[in-house]
Image (spheres, rainbow, N blue to C red):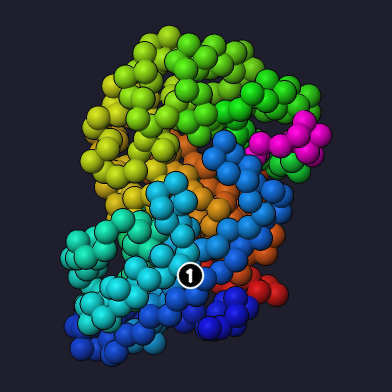
């Protein structure tokens, strides 16, 4: 397999004119996959795990001289890893090589039918196809969806669970970001928030990652967090505790956002009475097309919408960022948490997401990548 540097350095063929929609003009397709280890700037700790790196799947779909890039960031909670994602792509490879990419809606529906689970792999395929399509159309992906790049929200920067000393260090490093996201859900929650508040008065958003198992405890914690200047709380209780979360929601005053409870479009209607909003992640739902559907469903039900991410390179984060003009909140910082990103895409200026204006996702190899 090629090294990360070699993969990033290959020409991405960004400036190409729109071409015929006839599949015959596209020529034969190739698909390359690579498991890429993304090393983190700091140890990343949540209620669920602690890690120094993440292994993701990068995918290159090439046809007619144009290459679309995709990424899958597997989620251990759902039984996925980088190798299983690669096997899923290999399982669908023959079909994808023969399929007409211009029929991407039908192509992805068939991928979903053939591949059970493995939503990170599906996301990698979907992202690469949408990058390829919008490059061939010679437009940035956000423009394909009819969006205005000026409407992107501010993204938070996430602060993982750590000692008070390291927490303060992380908060200081996050000085350019106007809003921070704090991971909680352990017995150290109060110490974590006290450490954060000792160095900043910025608005905060909190993610408990299902950490509070008792509804009375959840109410106490949320009401305390409100007094600490927290704007909303993500997934305070386990995803399965829908009735308990509905009760908690009736006892607190700040919004509750579903994260682990919100995986796919069919989940959203049943969440509407227990949550105020949903956090949509391409890696949970299977890509850009599914995320777009979820945003529309959530909006139709009066729910707030948020785009989140896993630990990802600029490929996955930029893909989500192209949909961000549609949503109320963004937590698209996964690429900012890694030490050496092989690509450059969406940028952040004082927290504001700045979309590339190049065709497709608008990715470029990172300098020195």
Q: What residue appears at the point 55 percent right and 63 percent down from the top-left corner?
A: 55
Q: Quadrant of residue 223?
A: top right
Quadrant where the C terminus lies? bottom right
Q: Position of residue 161 (x, y in %)?
A: 66, 36
Residue 113 appears at what percent x and percent y?
A: 19, 61
User: In front here: 303 or 168?
Assistant: 168
**Residue 97 painted magenta:** no
Up the image or down, 317 lies above or below 195; here it is below
Q: Residue at x 38, y 32 (%)?
A: 239
Label 1: which secondary element: strand
Q: Residue at x 46, y 60 (%)?
A: 81
Classify residue 331 as left or right of residue 302: right
Q: Which residues are magenta?
A: 156-169
Q: Is residue 229 left or right of residue 147?
A: right
User: Dot 1: within a 10 Å radius of its alpha carbon, few (fewer than 14), some, or many (20 or more) residues?
Assistant: many
Determine whether 317 is above or below 1 in the image: above
Instruction: Tell me which residue sits at (48%, 70%) in the image.
Output: 58
Residue 338 placement: quadrant:
bottom right
Provide residue 195's location: percent of width, then percent of height.
75, 27
Query: 38 or 108: nearer the eye?
Result: 38
Q: Is residue 150 visible?
A: no
Viewer can see residue 182: yes
Where 118 sits versus 21, above or below? above
73 versus 364 height, above or below:
above
Q: Which residue is mark 1?
A: 58
The magenta stretch spans residue 163: yes
Q: Nearer the viewer, residue 121 or 368?
A: 121
Task: Give how far across and how far down residue 356 sits, in percent.
Answer: 51, 62
């Amino acid at each position: 397999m090629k090294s990360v540097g070699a993969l990033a350095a290959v020409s991405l063929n960004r400036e190409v004119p729109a071409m015929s929609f006839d599949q015959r003009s596209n020529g034969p397709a190739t698909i390359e996959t690579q498991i890429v280890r993304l090393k983190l700037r700091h140890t990343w700790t949540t209620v669920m795990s602690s890690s120094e790196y993440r292994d993701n799947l990068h995918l290159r779909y090439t046809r007619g001289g144009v290459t679309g890039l995709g990424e899958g960031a597997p989620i251990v909670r759902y039984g996925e890893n980088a190798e299983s994602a690669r096997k899923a792509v290999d399982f669908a490879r023959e079909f994808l090589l023969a399929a007409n990419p211009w029929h991407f809606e039908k192509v992805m529906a068939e991928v979903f039918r053939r591949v059970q689970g493995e939503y990170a792999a599906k996301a990698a395929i979907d992202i690469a196809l949408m990058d390829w399509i919008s490059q061939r159309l010679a437009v940035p992906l956000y423009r394909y969806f009819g969006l205005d790049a000026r409407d992107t929200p501010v993204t938070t920067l996430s602060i993982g669970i750590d000692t008070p000393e390291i927490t303060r260090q992380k908060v200081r490093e996050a000085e350019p970001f106007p809003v921070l996201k704090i991971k909680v859900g352990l017995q150290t929650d109060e110490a974590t928030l006290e450490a954060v508040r000792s160095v900043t008065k910025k608005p905060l958003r909190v993610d408990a990652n299902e950490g509070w198992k008792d509804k009375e405890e959840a109410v106490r914690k949320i009401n305390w967090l409100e007094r600490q200047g927290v704007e909303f709380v993500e997934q305070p209780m386990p995803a399965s505790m829908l009735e308990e979360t509905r009760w908690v929601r009736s006892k607190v005053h700040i919004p509750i956002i579903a994260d682990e409870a919100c995986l796919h479009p069919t989940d959203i209607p049943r969440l509407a009475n227990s949550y105020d909003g949903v956090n949509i992640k391409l890696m949970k739902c299977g890509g850009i097309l599914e995320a777009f559907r979820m945003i529309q469903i959530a909006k139709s039900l009066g729910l707030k919408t948020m785009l989140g991410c896993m630990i990802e390179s600029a490929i996955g984060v930029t893909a989500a960022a192209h949909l961000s003009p549609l949503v109320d909140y963004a937590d698209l910082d996964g690429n900012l948490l890694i030490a050496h990103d092989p690509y450059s895409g969406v940028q952040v200026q004082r927290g504001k997401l700045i979309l590339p204006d190049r065709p497709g996702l608008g990715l470029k190899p990172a300098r020195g990548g």
